[in-house]
Image (cartoon, rainbow, N blue to C red):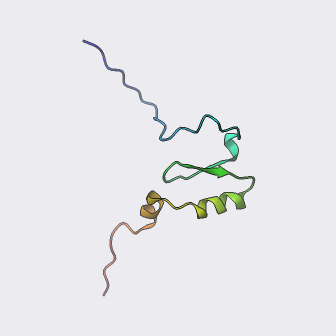
Amino acid sequence: MIPTVTTTHAVPQKLLPARVHVSRARLTICHHCFQVLGSAQNKAEVRALQLAHICKEKLNDQQPAAALPFN
């Protein structure tokens, strides 16, 4: 019988492309879908990249958890 190997560390959602030469500190990643959005030099550029990015996970996270009834 072959024993199974179990790990307790987190498995990465999406690996970065091998050709990325920009330092990881400057890369902006979507916190919803873990997609690399691009590199940013300052907080204003990071915010602009995040606002320009639209993904299904981000839209689902911004919706209310339950429908609000109308009176």
**Which quadrant would the C terminus be assigned to in this image?**
bottom left
Is residue 67 shown left or right of residue 1? right
Q: Position of residue 60 (x, y in %)?
A: 42, 62
Q: Position of residue 43 (x, y in %)?
A: 71, 58
The answer to which image quadrant residue 2 occupies is top left
The residue sitting at 44% across, 57% down in the picture is 57
Q: Is residue 27 above or below residue 11?
A: below
Quarter of the N terminus within the rendering: top left
Rendering coords of residue 19 (x, y %): 64, 36
Farthest-out residue, left: 1
Going by the image, does 59 lie left or right of 40? left
In the picture as drawn, the residue positioned furthest to the top comes out as 1
Residue 70 screen position, x and y as percent = 32, 84
- Is residue 22 shown above or below 5? below
Residue in the image at 75% along x and 52% along y: 41
Residue 71 falls left or right of residue 50 = left
The residue shown at (61%, 34%) is 18
Task: Residue 6: name its quadrant.
Answer: top left
Q: Nearer the viewer, residue 8 or 16?
A: 16
